[in-house]
Image (cartoon, grey):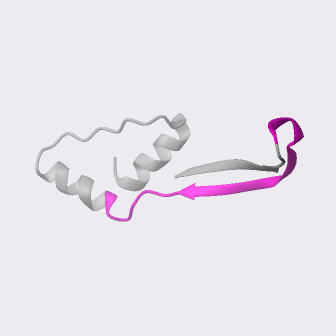
Amino acid sequence: MGLRIIALCRGASLESLTYTGVCGVCDPPRESARDAIAALRRAQVQVKMVTGDARPTALAVAQMVGL
């Protein structure tokens, strides 16, 4: 499950930005993903995951959805 950290700033231009804090955003897989993957496997479809996430994130998501 990916946790993205977003820096929060405010200002009228890039040069005048003032840091105001951080915000964490969690983007979990859909609850139906595990069942969908299981159904594909029962239909003898070979399921692969392609992601731009970091390896630890990809492995965690794969485990969550049954890959």
Q: Residue at x 68, y 49 (%)?
A: 5
Residue segment shown in magenta: 13-33
3 shown above or below 57 = below
Q: Is residue 29 left or right of residue 45?
A: right
Q: Quadrant of residue 24?
A: bottom right
Q: Is residue 45 left or right of residue 28?
A: left
18 shown above or below 38 = above
Residue 10 in picture, x, y percent from top left:
82, 51
Q: Residue at x 25, y 41 (%)?
A: 47
Q: Is residue 62 magenta?
A: no
Q: Is residue 17 magenta?
A: yes
Identify which residue, 11 or 37, lies in the foreground.
Answer: 11
Q: Quadrant of residue 25?
A: bottom right
18 shown above or below 33 = above
Q: Residue at x 81, y 49 (%)?
A: 9
- Looking at the image, which residue sits at the far bottom? 31
Q: Residue at x 33, y 58 (%)?
A: 33
Q: Quadrant of residue 36?
A: bottom left
Residue 39 in picture, x, y percent from top left:
18, 56
Residue 62 in picture, x, y percent from top left:
41, 46
Residue 45 in picture, x, y percent from top left:
15, 43
Identify which residue, 7 or 53, lies in the foreground.
Answer: 7
